[in-house]
Image: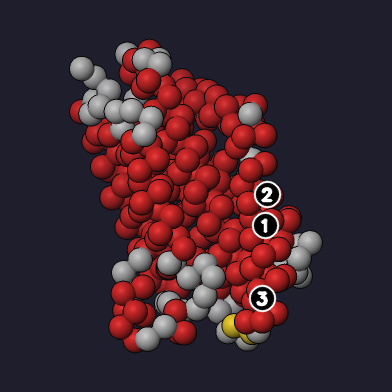
Amino acid sequence: MSMSQMWVALCTIVVKEVRRFTRIWAQTLLPPAITMALYFVVFGNLIGPRIGQMEGYNYMEFIVPGLIMMSVITNSYANVVSSFFGMKFQRSIEELLVSPVPNWIVLIGYVAGGVARGLAVGFIVTLLSLGFTDLQVHNIAITASMVLLTAIVFSLGGFINAVYATKFDDISIVPTFVLTPLTYLGGVFYSISLLPEFWQLVSKVNPILYMVNAFRYGILGVSDVNIMVSYAMVVVFIVLLFSFALRLLNQGKGIRA
């Protein structure tokens, strides 16, 4: 295929993926926004005043970056895993695989769709947060780059989950038993400086901690971890997950009989 043909193929996949989640926006965009709004009300407005300040900010300001990142993580992952597995389940993925479109174009297209949904929900949650606190951005470059890289990481993770999934129950196992615990223990609602030294070390094994704190640094200018370590970890994850996902696609794992 020529470059122009590959570009058309990529745009087609991305547009299809974006139309997929925007067409059913009441199921894909509205529920996470309502959930995050409840977090703002319960944790920020009701519990926050009792907690007081954290890292020099009131509790509402402190948790907003974490909640935005949590919405990006869950929705970028969910979009790809549900979309690609749906294609497998309907056997329509075979039409794409027999086409001359390179597998890396297919992978990038699905990941871009997941990133688009993650960023869309993140933007909606950000707008909602303005009704509860004055959001000031400390460093726009770090904020934008980290949320984009994180969305890519979890879109790739969702793709890998979809490749291995053989039934609909399989696409909920990882989000329920892996993604949700790591997110809640990733410093979204607290600073790890409050933990005993042993649990601080345990927390630093959690990759989501680095993503949440780098994003929080971009907005508030405070972080529990080194920002350069966060970027290095995210980039390494992207390279490894992309390579692994492309290998699975090339092998036809879970797709070809």
The structure residue drawn at horizontal position 67% and vertical position 65%, both measured from the top left corner, is 42
Does residue 245 lie above or below 85 as drawn?
A: below
Disc 3 crowd rating (10 Å Cα; few below 14, some 14-19, many 20+) is many
The reply to whether callout 3 and callout 2 are in contact (CB within 8 Å) is no
Give coordinates of residue 45: x percent, y percent: 72, 70
Q: Which quarter shows the C terminus? A: top left
Residue at the spot of label 1: 38
Give coordinates of residue 255: x percent, y percent: 27, 23
Give coordinates of residue 188: x percent, y percent: 52, 67
Does residue 35 lie above or below 94 as drawn?
A: below
**SS at badge 1:** helix
Label located before the other in sequence (3 or 1): 1
Distance from label 2 to label 1 (Cα)?
6 Å
Q: Residue 23, located in which quarter of the rendered image?
A: top right
Label located before the other in sequence (3 or 2): 2
Residue at the spot of label 2: 34
The structure residue drawn at horizontal position 42% and vertical position 36%, both measured from the top left corner, is 81
